Image (cartoon, rainbow, N blue to C red):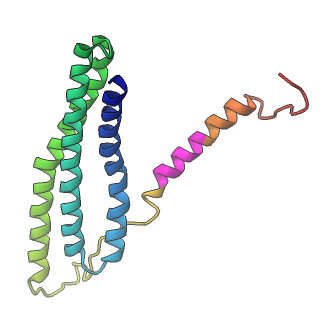
Amino acid sequence: MKTLLRTLLYLALIVWLGAEIFFPVVAVITFNTLLPDTHTAGTIVGELLRIVHGMGLVSGMVALALLALFPAWGIYKPRRVVAPMALLVMMIACTVYSQFAIIPAMERDRIAAAARSMQPTQPTPATSTSTSCTIEASTWKKPFCCWGWLRWRWWRRRNLGRTGSRNWGSER
């Protein structure tokens, strides 16, 4: 029973964090594919963000409920679940803020930008005639490359020691 409940906890966290990691990849592909039509790309990304936040809220509530019940069921000691519960509450609060404060503001800005783009305007020398929003494909790769480099440094230090060389001929 303990294994099943821990598996449910880890599954809830994996679903939530996996969706949060997968979302930037989908957003970059969407923006780069629909570059000329940023209104459609914004609509698609907005809907995806709502879905990701919904998954996050459900997964966060499941994980929070399980962590709250673990001490009562004798799986963990109460003091061991306080810090994870505090972090989950902070993550849920950030998700709620993003879902109900940031996304509606983004939607208003997207609609206002679409309305401005439909109005015929005469460009003046002081204004720019072309505005486009592009996302570099390499921007989402930077955190992964940094994580890979840190992981390689950790492995190298662990396996090769601080000197950087390993004596392969001798046994430890």
> Residue placed at 24% from the left, 27% from the top?
66
Viewport quadrant of the C terminus: top right
* Residue found 41% across the figure and 66% down from its top: 136
From the viewer's perspective, tell me whether residue 28 is left or right of residue 88. Answer: right
Query: Residue drawn 15% across and 51% down?
Result: 102
Question: Looking at the image, which residue is at 52% across and 47% down?
Answer: 146
Residue 134 appears in the picture as rendered? no
User: Residue 62: image x %, image y %?
Assistant: 21, 34
Across and down, in percent, residue 130 comes to 27, 81
Span highlighted in magenta in the image: 142-151
Figure check: 160 above or below 103: above
Q: Nearer the viewer, residue 11 or 115?
A: 11
Picture mark count: 0
Q: Is residue 26 magenta?
A: no
Quarter holding residue 27: bottom left
- Front residue of 21/3: it is 3
Picture quarter containing residue 109? bottom left
Up-down relation of residue 41 to residue 52 (above or below): below
Residue 162: % across, % down: 73, 28
49 vs 51, nearest the viewer: 51
Extreme-front residue of the structure: 1
Dominant SS in magenta: helix
Residue 123: percent from left, percent from top = 18, 85
Tell me the quarter of the image containing the N terminus: top left
Query: In the displayed structure, does residue 53 sit left or right of residue 136?
Result: left
Of 81 and 110, the residue lying toward us: 81
Residue 97 can be seen, yes or no: yes
126 w.r.t. 88: above or below = below
